[in-house]
Image (cartoon, rainbow, N blue to C red):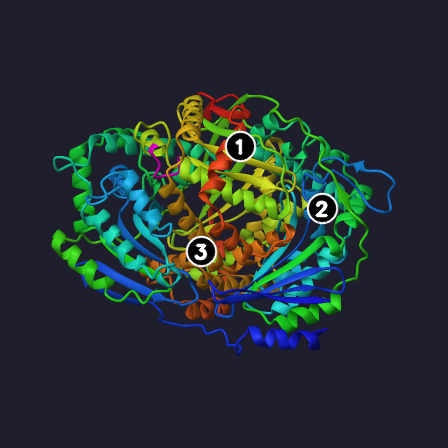
Amino acid sequence: MKKEILDSSRLGESYIKISHDSGLCICMYPMRSFSTAFAIFGTRYGSVDTTFRTDNEPDFITVPEGIAHYLEHKLFEGEECNAFENFARTGAHSNAYTTFDSTAYYFSCSDRFGENLRTLLKFVQEPYFTDENVQKEQGIISQEIKSYLDDPGWKVFFNGLEAVYSNNPVRINIAGTTESIKKINKELLNRCYSTFYNLNNMTLSIAGNFDPDEALAVCDDLLKPSKDIGLKTIIPDEPEKVLKKKVTEKLYCALPLYQLSFKMPNLSGRECIKQSHIYNIMLDSAIGNFSSFYSKAYDSGLINDTFSAGVFKGRGFFLPIISGDSREPDLVSEEVIKELYRLKKEGIPEEDFEIIKKTTYSELIGAFNNVGTVAKAMFNANLNDISIYDNFEMVSSVTYKDITDALEQLDIENSSLSVIEPIEH
Amino acid sequence: MTAQCKPFIAELISERKDIIILNNEYNRREITDNVFFTSVTDKKFKINKITVCFISPLSEDASVNAVIPRLLTKCNEKLDTMAEFNRRLAELYSASINWTVLADTDYQICELSAVVLADKFALNGEKISEEIVGILLDCIFSPYFENGFFPQGSLNIEKQNQTDDNDAEINDKTSYSYLRAFEEAFKGEPAEIHWGGTNDQVNRITAASALEAYRKMITSARTEIICVGESSFDGISDIFAKAFRLSGRCPSVLPKVILSPTKDEVRRVTETLDIEQSKLVMFFKSSGRYKGKYALIMVQLLYGGTESSKLFTIVREKMSLCYYCFSRCSSVKGYLTAECGVDAENLEKAEKEALNQLKEIADGNFTDDEISKAKLFITNALLSSRDTVNGISSKCLSQILYPDESFPIGTEIEKYNAVTREDIILAAKAFRLDTVFILRPGSEEKAE
């Protein structure tokens, strides 16, 4: 078993990273002046992971969309009682979430941390699926999917992904579709559970006011050693070009919503995180809120406070995105593209780049203000095989040349515009 | 394994401290006429937040009041363009000057806040907190004017943004349904008024009326300045006191929150839109029939406030009718809700079961275990609020606005623990159905 202490001289703080004998990676960040502790137990398994194999299988298999999310719902249900009930006995707040590339179960508490950690480790490691309880969940998840279909923010985003990607499962709603979830049964859930909920594929991340000795003792007691089964997942090959240049849908909303996405090659792990910092700094320097573009567009009423630019990234996808709402979404897209071409020719002001680096550093520091944010950051960092403190070094090492290269490499024509237009009412 | 870890862990952590529940930890004082200053210093935070809250009764001035903070947070007399203003904030390590306007019971609260990294993290020893306080003060007391008024161009933009925000309530169907139900439940009362007023009122704002509203806000609104963060905030109260005195304070009294009567007949409102999922929002009112805040909130927790509640375990988990099914309440206005998203064919079933589950509580059909879980939940939530700057700020404001209803955390926990089964039953019996709002799929019409 390997133990590391990772520290940050900037923050004056440290955390422990342990490769536990069971196969699990454990990250612990004591923050003793806080009142609460936050623990996440999660797996590198998300909605994009529909095609996979292990050493026990001869070939890759593809399963219906929505299983990662379905499992997230089902794991709370135990043979004797629901995990929520166990957390309720201590007053802890618990929940879970599924993203494109991970699923996480968490609790936060101000007392009885050890008991809550026991509950967390037990329920995630002890699935209980029956034909009846699997069927029952369909109704609940179906309602969840329907609520998203009425949400213009959700739809502009997913329509945008569908327009960019031809084959990548990131284009599908994380919860699946009302059709795909009908194909999910107990056998499929068991198969995906045993494949992805292997401790070698998982991380336990704890931050806040807790006793690391106690946490380790609970882990020693409850973690079931897992053999590395050689899990491999693949994202289907993707054409270089976007599938559609524009997609439009009508929903009930006040103003049109837009999302302009620039297709780029996939990245993963440390390189993905590093490039996301570079592209975020580049976009903020180019069209951020003190740029000449932003002032002109805001003062003319073309954009408003909803305008944002950033990188949507994860295992198997890397997509700079500009979004917001506007009366003239097509004009926003045209003006952004025009500005990016202008800056490619004339260059981003170097002093703006230096300011944005400082703001990025500050935002990283600010993230250590909250136990839940720290726990999530450690969890996500571990999924990408980096330390949370690596972000400081990555940001401080970004150069002006890096962002000019990033702008140069951005294939502006290889972009797609998603618009939600209001239904008249 | 544990024995091997101990040396590493001992190096990392200092002696364990007990959790200290503090009473009277907020240092609040009046610094000039009806302007109060509260500060909470907590070295665990890495940022500082200074919030100036202008509190006035909800009225026909809601619209113009909502536009003022938008104007004040874009620039000021010294940083007189948005680009220059945003650039300076970015140079101050991504400091921000924000606005929030909300409706809380019968009040409209217009907040201007500054959030800034603690000085100790500045790379070159800059005094960033001091400068950001200066910028915030300039925003409030030295706004950018042209010929003595807010620039017409800026005013037009922010009026447009306000009407857009008012219209955008429909984007989120869950929150739209709640707001519509709220409007119907409190029709004819100040609480009915939306935080942003109405679009007609926004469109009637002129440069003169905006100036008048701005002057009224800084001279007469009840003002609470709440500072939370790593800093000691020394000297800031004096700076604010001087600025407010110079503005010429002539404060008005904030009226007490009105008790809302329960309608004799349940008001039912249905709206249709071309949507996938129906929304059901039910408003119950207590109307003073029971006055104990802590028992009222215990009812809400048992009914639909946690994952162990009746609405979650029965309507969602057992009946599989919905993905979300919860309740919220206000002890100050005396209301309780039941809210869910369901298929249209299950609306009646969901409404019937929501009524039934409240009756179960009023009939005493809940266990000691359920009470205990609810008390533990609220204790955890109260203690958790001390772990974020926003949690502490909100708690401060709640204690300040509703001193008969909100106390320091330690006292609140004691009061919740003192609630008995009989208190909960009496409180549940006090709630009567007042309003039902339904949003359902269909061609657009409003039916009543």
Give the residue type that dot 1 points to: Gln
Q: For mark 2, name the chain.
A: A
Residue range (magenta): A287-292
Residue B23 lies, in percent from the top left, at 39, 72
Is residue A81 in sight in this rendering? yes
Res A82 → quadrant: bottom right
Element class at badge 1: helix
Label number found at residue A409: 1
Looking at the image, is mark 2 or mark 3 nearer the viewer?
A: 3
Q: For mark 3, name the chain.
A: A
* Magenta stretch holds residue B326: no
Residue B118 lies, in percent from the top left, at 37, 60
SS assignment for the magenta stretch, majority: loop
Res A119 → quadrant: bottom right
Distance (Cα) linking label 1 and label 2 = 39 Å
Dot 2 corresponds to which residue?
A: A71
Residue B132 lies, in percent from the top left, at 29, 54
- Of the two numbered discs 1 and 2 on the same chain, state the one appearing first in sequence: 2
Q: Is residue B129 left or right of residue A155?
A: left
* Magenta stretch holds residue A288: yes
Dot 3 corresponds to which residue?
A: A366
